Amino acid sequence: MKFLVITKMRHPVSPDIAMGLFDDLITWSKKYVASKQLEQTWGFAGMYAGGGILQVKSLEELDSIMTEYPFGPFSDIEIYGLTDLVAAVERAQKATG
């Protein structure tokens, strides 16, 4: 199962805490990129925000990974399940057809 994850900073973090969280975020990202569970990552230009595509086997696995996300307590997080576009449109055609 693939999920699009978007994170946006909800409120500022003090600089002394932020520096450690940045290090933790780099470690978290490298860990899940290496495991191939985090397929893509990016930051949004000019914002304390970013996203990625997670590939997981279950919702429990997704929850476990996101529980470790260092900025979780300070962020608004949106998660969207992804599906193949053509297959989704074909299902919609059948349902309305």
Image: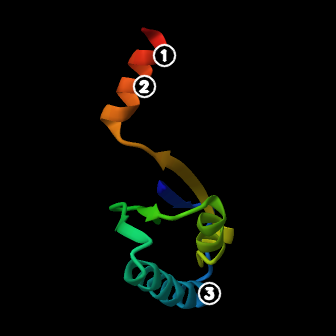
Secondary structure of the residue carrying tag 1 is helix
- In the picture, the disc for residue 34 is none
User: Is the Cβ of the residue at disc 1 closer than 8 Å to that at disc 2?
Assistant: yes
How many other residues sit within 10 Å of disc 3, few (<14), some (14-19) or many (≥20)? few
User: Is the Cβ of the residue at disc 3 closer than 8 Å to that at disc 2?
Assistant: no
Secondary structure of the residue carrying tag 2 is helix
Tell me which corner region of the image, top left, top right, bottom left or bottom right, holds residue 66. bottom right
Residue annotated with mark 3 = 17
Residue annotated with mark 2 = 91
**Near-viewer residue (52 or 64):** 64
Residue annotated with mark 1 = 95
**Hey, what amino acid is under mark 3?**
Ile
Residue at x 44%, y 85% (from the top left corner): 26
**Hey, what amino acid is under mark 1?**
Ala
User: Mark 1 or 3 closer to N-term?
Assistant: 3
Tell me which corner region of the image, top left, top right, bottom left or bottom right, holds residue 69. bottom right
User: Going by the image, does 41 lie left or right of 18?
Assistant: left
Secondary structure of the residue carrying tag 3 is helix
Residue at x 59%, y 57% (from the top left corner): 77
Foreground mark, 1 or 3?
Answer: 1
* CA separation in Å, label 1 and label 3: 51 Å
